[in-house]
Image (tube, grey):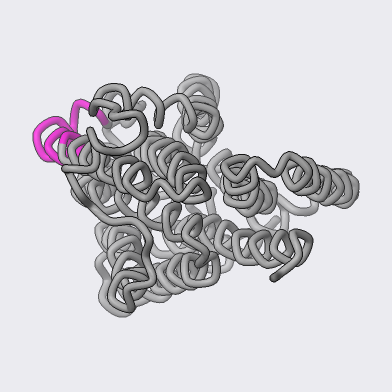
Amino acid sequence: MESIGKEFGRYTFFNIMSAMGTSAYVLVDTFFIANGVGPMGLTGLNLALVIFAVMTATGVMLGTGGSIRFAIEKARKNYEGGNSAFTVCMIIGVSLGCIVLLAGLLFCRQIAMFLGANSETMSLTVVYLKTVMVFAPMFIANNIIVAFIRNDGEPRLAAIGMIIGNLANIVLDWVFIFPMGMGMFGAALATGISPVLCIAIVSIHFIKKKNTFKFDRRSIKSGTRGMTFGARLKDIMGLGAFSFVNEISSGIVIFVFNKLLLDLGGNIAVAAYGVIANVAIVAIAVFTGITQGSQPLVSRSYGSGSEADVKRVYKLAAIILARLFGISGVFMAYPAAEAAAFVVSMCVKGPLCGKTKCSK
């Protein structure tokens, strides 16, 4: 049997790669939109990221909370309880996704105005928002399914699905924006296709019948302690609350900064902030990967009653986090150089200042 240390290394590696891939495509979106659409497109992207954060937070909350419950019940050999958690997550997740979809179709302009879009950025923000919100059910379902598969002993497949989906987003970003000239709509469409492709890839887990969970409405009352739908949902939301707060906080920060910067420096200030915010997302992804890699092992160990393994995983995660904080401190000493490097790269084809030639 694989030692807990080796399992931790395997889970953590694949989840860091997955989280890095997810953050990388946001950064690539920034680069391609800056060069292919211009600074107003970059502003529209940063305004729309608030809604993207809401969708991600919802999916991560349900995926994390549900998969924690699933891993615990699986360790206790209560597979009905695991099915119950997955069923509730999918019903609620897809339902909320459909609500977001309808809101995007019916009230997208009003949402864009609330986020801070003005006459210069309205059309670009609406195009990006509406397209991404149409894919809301897929974004939320993807976060749920990937989390459950990760906790079902397949961190490698979950990471492969996420990475391939993100790579496809990067490639399609370039194809849609430059050769096909689809602009902001192309960038949003590439982003929307990513979770669809990821779900298709991780579905191999079900096709090969390696899954120990499934969608089964009958399991809701026959699962753990005969819990009702409402009680199960409350349990899942409680377990996933910390993940929701972590994800939604970034959206709130972006929203507040956007509002302040629009008053202080206008659209260009928001575009510049978008560059910095998206670079930060890449750095945070490493820490997110460690927590996602630790979670399945902690949940399983807790479910099986192995307190020693829980402490072992916690200790390994703490050691790695401490080392990474030390390394990141070196890079944080040179924030100006990092920001300058990215801005210069954007100035090659589409300067933030809006000029065709840049003297600085």
**Residue 94 located within the stretch drawn in magenta:** no
Q: In this view, does 343 lie to the left or right of 236?
A: right
Residue 9, image quadrant: bottom right
Report the magenta stretch's main SS: helix
Question: Count the marks: how many?
Answer: 0
> Outermost residue, left direction?
106
Q: Locate residue 203, reporting x and y percent.
A: 31, 70
Q: Is residue 246 left or right of residue 127?
A: right
Which residue range is magenta in the image?
99-111
Give the residue displayed 68% in from the left and 67% down from the top.
10
Q: Can residue 152 be seen in this view?
A: yes
Residue 333, image quadrant: top right
Relative to 265, residue 173 above or below? below
The one nearer the camera, 108 or 193, is 193
Q: In this view, does 65 lie to the left or right of 121?
A: right
Q: Locate residue 15, reporting x and y percent.
A: 60, 60
The one nearer the camera, 238 or 312, is 312
Q: Is residue 227 left or right of residue 11?
A: left
Q: Is residue 356 visible?
A: no
Give the residue displayed 47% in from the left and 41% down from the top.
64
Give the residue displayed 59% in from the left and 50% down from the top.
292
The one nearer the camera, 117 or 46, is 46
